[in-house]
Image (spheres, grey):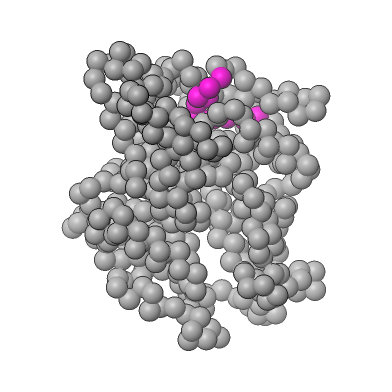
Amino acid sequence: MIYRVDETHPPIPSKKPGGTYHWQLYSRRATLNPFFAFRLGLLFWDHFLPIYRKQPFQVCACDPSGPPIACAISARATQLRIPLNVFVARREPKSFGTDNWFDGHAMRSLPVLMVDDAAGSAPFLQAGSIRVQQKLGLPLHRNYFVLVNKVGRGFSKEAQHTENYLDNELVALFTMNNFCRSAAEFEERYGHKPNWTGLVR
Amino acid sequence: MATSPTGPGWFDENAAIEWCRGFIDHHCIFRSPPGQALLTTRDGGRELWQFYFPIAAFNQRFAQTVGMLFWRRYAKQFRERPFQLCGCESGGVPVTCAIQQVAIAYGIPVNVFEAKKKPKDYGIKNWLEGVVAKDVPVVLVDDVIGGQHTLNRNAKRLTEFGLELVGAFAIASCKRQPPLELELGSRKIEVQALLGPQDFARTHDRYVAKYRRLPQFQGTVV
């Protein structure tokens, strides 16, 4: 799920005009994969089932990367016979209809576990959690859940942004130390070049 | 679940569709009260009713039921020639995930990707999210079909990207009665929708007349 610059993959434009990225996470390459999603759901409940049994919670997925993760969690919950409510925090309100900030149904009685693909410099998870508190008046769960906490070797302190999530405990399956960010690092670790597969359009 | 989504067993397809219909009719349609058009349209107009499918798509029983209903229709086609699913942003994504997760629970892996409304404006500037297999046919999935613009637009785009479209699926068509078709040049693609507009009491008055009670929209509106 990582785009890495090498001889056939050029640097890509960053969010900042004129800037470039040498690697980028594309989490939905993983979370829309059937095997990954299945295991992701199991890993989530492996960690959270004892916590859920003490205090049930609902899940709020941050649009647009969170919903596939929430679906994986919900599907395994169904299999494990765990009742779970899921709703979505949008990045911006819908521009028609009820102009809603949230999709789905938020229950009034349960704390909200925020779910996203990554905790990093972009404050989407934080913004979503603030809207859950401000607009819905719901308490947050004591954890956030993400696939990747974008911290690790080589990140500047400013880029780590862990202070955004200090109000709760961030639970992440991975940090960037688990991955090879450069093509050279990948080749050294796995003995072959990165294989960025599939049609990219 | 005791049986496979494709095999014989206790799963009653008609009862499952009726349960989904009832869930949507009772929980997923915002109806403006009489004399008040509280909803806005994309072009600045007013609307009396609107479907909000995420309420259903993120409901555990609904998601599982729709997944089972999908595979009752498409399992034979998948066995003969495996396909991948493309969910239309944003409503189609949880539906494709539900279909995928029902299948993987029985050991049937089906790849999913997402067609975005607009390309990312940085990075690889992609229209599609997920790993897209170039040579595997595609079934396009959305939650609800209105004027069919989203399906038509995505079908055309996927075809331009060199992908072969072999079907389209939605939970409901809210304006046009199925059967529906996509026209791709000279080709016609079948669009399967579980439910049509006549299955729902879309306005407040019709709901009250049908069920003898006030509608209770379940969505979170803030």
Identify which residue, B172 or A77, lies in the foreground. Answer: B172
Q: Which residue is located at x 48 percent, y 72 percent?
A: A120
Instruction: In the rendered view, tell whether residue B106 sits above or below residue A157.
Output: above
B173 magenta-colored: yes
How many numbered circles does the render carry? 0
Q: Which residues are magenta?
A: B167-176
Front residue of this view, candidates B124 and A102: A102
Q: Is residue B198 visible?
A: yes
> Image quadrant for the N terminus of chain B?
top left
User: In this picture, is A121 found above or below A128?
Assistant: below
Q: Residue at 68%, 76% (x, y): give it.
A: A19
Q: Quadrant of residue B51?
A: top left
Quarter of the view holding residue B86: top right
Task: In the displayed orientation, state which residue is furthest to the left.
Answer: A54
Q: Is residue A59 left or right of residue B162?
A: left
Q: Is residue A44 left or right of residue B4?
A: left
A101 with respect to B187 (left or right):
left
For image coordinates 63% across by 73% down, the residue present is: A16
Query: Residue at 68% of width from left, 37% of height from top?
Result: B153
Q: Position of residue B23 (x, y in %)?
A: 35, 27
Whether A76 is drawn above or below B215: the answer is below
Q: Measured from the top left, where is residue A112 in percent x and y?
A: 29, 56
Residue A21 position, x and y percent, is 66, 74
Along the line of sight, the residue nearer the viewer: B219 or A50: B219
Residue B99 in view in this figure: no
- By secondary structure, the bulk of the magenta-drawn segment is best described as strand
In the rendered structure, does residue B189 fall within the stretch colored magenta?
Answer: no
Q: Position of residue B199 (x, y in %)?
A: 43, 17
Q: Name the residue at the top extreme.
A: B209
